[in-house]
Image (cartoon, rainbow, N blue to C red):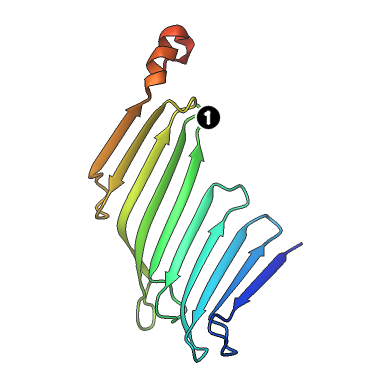
Amino acid sequence: MVRTVTESFDADGNGNNDSVKTTVIDNAGKLTATSNYYSTGGVLESAYTSTLSGDGLTRTYSTDRNADTQAELYTTDTTVLGNDGYVTRTVAHSKVTLGVGKGATTTYTALGKEEYLTNNNGLYSLSKLDLDGDNVFDFATEARHAASCELQRLFPALRQ
């Protein structure tokens, strides 16, 4: 059964909605939330949409800054659960450019990427950032939590 909830808000009391948020949960459990923002005259100015997959591992975010029904900014947030217990989360930010004319294509230009890796006991993590979308990580931070060293000394089975 598809479930839908709509919330409207008239902040200035002029009788026109300033924002309308619609949340839909489909039969597969996918959640889609759309927020529309309106001018005082009731004209759509911008829209923001987010989705969450039924398994909770994939999220998307899109922003339509000029209300032309085409998102200019797009983000994907994907979590992968490895068989070895490691969790990898990748967040990719893109700019969307629409093609013009017959046969034109829409392109996604990478703006940046974040990648996070955590081991199965949570005592090791690696964070990497690509700040300019060139698929080369500009910064990386690796953390071995202090408790990890002591735990590995006491319990050799925790060593990876």
- Quadrant containing the N terminus in the rendered view: bottom right
Residue under the point 48% across and 70% down: 48
Q: Position of residue 118 (x, y in %)?
A: 43, 32
> As displayed, is residue 46 above or below residue 62?
below
Q: Which corner quadrant of the image does residue 13 belong to?
A: bottom right
Q: Residue furthest right?
A: 1
Residue under the point 51% across and 28% down: 85
**Left or right: residue 101 compared with residue 1:** left
Q: Position of residue 26 (x, y in %)?
A: 68, 61
Q: Foreground residue, 155 or 29?
A: 155
> As displayed, is residue 144 above or below residue 75?
above
Residue under the point 31% across and 58% down: 110
Q: Which corner quadrant of the image does residue 24 belong to?
A: bottom right
- Quadrant containing the C terminus in the rendered view: top left
The residue that mark 1 highlights is 83
Q: Position of residue 94 (x, y in %)?
A: 35, 61
Mark 1 closeness class: few <14, some 14–19, many ≥20 residues within 10 Å: few
Residue under the point 44% across and 55% down: 76
Instruction: Give amino acid for label 1.
Output: Asn
Q: Foreground residue, 88 or 125?
A: 125
> As displayed, is residue 142 above or below residue 107?
above
Q: Foreground residue, 149 or 77?
A: 149
Q: Secondary structure at mark 1?
A: loop
